[in-house]
Image: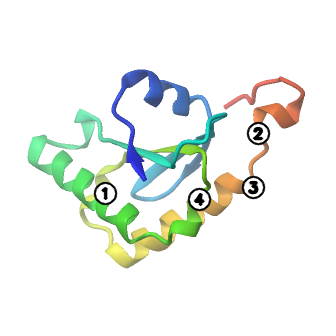
Amino acid sequence: MDRLRQRADFLAVANGARANGAAFVVQGRSRDDDGPVRVGFTVTKKNGNAPQRNRIRRRLRELVKRLDVISMRPHHDYVLVGRRAALSRDFAAMLEDLRSALRRLDRQPKTSDLNGETLKR
């Protein structure tokens, strides 16, 4: 599993499917290459000061590390957008939220399934 680091990759994933959770939002999109799963993490300034944002980001990274490999689809990019609730939410509940969000992403129709029409969000 690789990390997303470039802004263009984050913007591309932002146009994909989205699943909301209490402590984070998961965005995902399929890629056309044979590369590994890539994951990015972001936390906006409205979620607190730098130490709080870093703590949220560390918790999100640990969630992905403990996640079953099979939960994430190959050739996909994912971005976890942290929310302030990630500071106080139980870690086990967050892990289950992430599994549930990934299952919901898999069930959402892809833009190619809609004959080129994009989804309205």
Rate crowding at label 2 as few (under 14), some (14 to 19) or many (20 or more) other CA atoms within 10 Å. some
Residue annotated with mark 4: 102
- Asked if 63 appears above or below 111 in the picture, the reply is below
Q: Marks 2 and 4, Cα distance to the nearest angstrom?
A: 14 Å
Q: Position of residue 58 (x, y in %)?
A: 23, 56
Secondary structure of residue under mark 2? loop
Q: Position of residue 107 (x, y in %)?
A: 75, 55
Under mark 2, the amino acid is Lys
Rate crowding at label 4 as few (under 14), some (14 to 19) or many (20 or more) other CA atoms within 10 Å. many
Please identify the quadrant where the C terminus is shown.
top right
Q: Marks 1 and 2, Cα distance to the nearest angstrom?
A: 26 Å
Under mark 1, the amino acid is Arg
Secondary structure of residue under mark 4? helix
Left or right, 94 with reference to 32: left
Q: Residue at 90%, 27% (x, y): give it.
A: 115
Q: Which mark is residue 107?
A: 3
Q: Marks 3 and 4, Cα distance to the nearest angstrom?
A: 9 Å
Q: Are marks 1 and 2 in contact (CB under 8 Å)?
A: no
Q: Residue at 29%, 51% (x, y): give it.
A: 84
Q: Position of residue 56 (x, y in %)?
A: 25, 54
Q: Marks 1 and 4, Cα distance to the nearest angstrom?
A: 15 Å
Sequence order check, earlier mark of 2 and 4: 4
- Asked if 17 appears above or below 64 in the picture, the reply is above
Under mark 4, the amino acid is Leu
Left or right, 66 with reference to 37: left
Q: Residue at 58%, 68% (x, y): give it.
A: 70
Residue annotated with mark 2: 110
Q: Which mark is residue 36?
A: none
Q: Residue furthest bottom?
A: 92
Residue annotated with mark 1: 61
Rate crowding at label 3 as few (under 14), some (14 to 19) or many (20 or more) other CA atoms within 10 Å. few
How many numbered badges does the structure rendering display? 4
